[in-house]
Amino acid sequence: MYALVEPAEALRHQELLIDVAAAGDFGTYRYRQAARASMAIATYADPQRSPIAAELTGPYEEQCAVMYERLLERLLNIAVHPEECSELWIDEDRELTASEAALATGAITIEERSDIDLAIVDIAASEPERRGHRFAADEYIGVHPMAINNATGCLRLLQVHGRRYIYTDRYESWVQYQSRRPLPRVDLRPLADVLTAADSDTVWTASSPSSLTAQLQTAEESSLDRKVIVDHLSEHLRSAPHAWNPYDTPG
């Protein structure tokens, strides 16, 4: 949208603005200022923390209109000079720094299973839960998503933190991604039913495969150990029918 209303400025800052978009949609970044700009935008979209909270009181459509109107005029300055609005991103930026440090020290490790495009993210029990935004005001709990997404090219993620499990289909498999063809998504809801039946401590839930980032997760700590979860999930990803393929368009 910014490129349409300010084409000359958008082209002048093309690489940075593309990275801001990647940070917001894909949870990846090359330039830290782009990551911080995305965090600031997410804060603007949060009615509890937004500098324009008083204007975000109507229906969703009206809030979107307000966000576009207010942020299109602020976007370039937020991206080029994020230090001028550090109060909007500084807390989340610390979460990202800590998540990246945990990866560097081995407190968080990643095991990749390339045949099913799955990355298993093991978080040491001593590590706290960390938070990061997805898209505008959605929140992701566990490890900051930019730290993980920058560390693995796998588009299917299983986060293991003690007996807490969160599986996520990254946003790249929701769109017609051009860099490569992601494996089509499968419906995780039948697997949630299987795991709930086997779990004595919690209920498993799963979102629709058409969700922006489809997830499978527990409400509380699970009675099932890591191997059981990984085996069930791996088999389901291999054998379940495709349930979402953005490249399937009417001919």
Image (cartoon, rainbow, N blue to C red):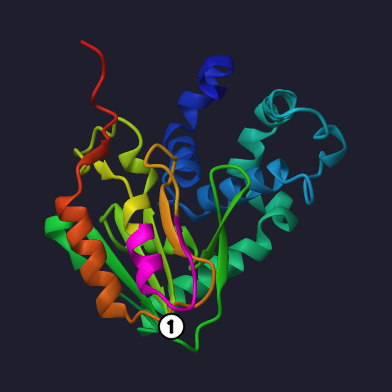
* 193 part of magenta stretch: yes
**Which residue is rendered at x = 35% and y = 66% of the image?**
195
Say above or below: 56 vs 28: above
Outermost residue toward the left in this view: 115
Q: Quadrant of the N terminus?
A: top right
Outermost residue toward the top in this view: 251
Q: Is 82 on the left-hand or right-hand side of 215?
A: right
Where's residue 213, x and y in %? 43, 46
Q: Where does label 1 land, which residue?
A: 162
Q: Is 111 on the left-hand or right-hand side of 82?
A: left
Say above or below: 218 vs 85: below
Q: Residues within 10 Å of mark 1 (few under 14, many from 20)?
A: some
* 22 part of magenta stretch: no
Where's residue 77, x and y in %? 66, 38
Q: Is 91 on the left-hand or right-hand side of 242?
A: right
Judged from the image, the secondary structure of the residue bearing numbered disc 1 is loop
Question: Which contiguous range is marked in magenta?
Answer: 192-205
Where's residue 83, x and y in %? 67, 54
- Amino acid type shown at disc 1: Gly
**Which residue is rendered at x = 63% and y = 34% of the image?**
75
- Front residue of 77/103: it is 103
Say above or below: 55 vs 200: above
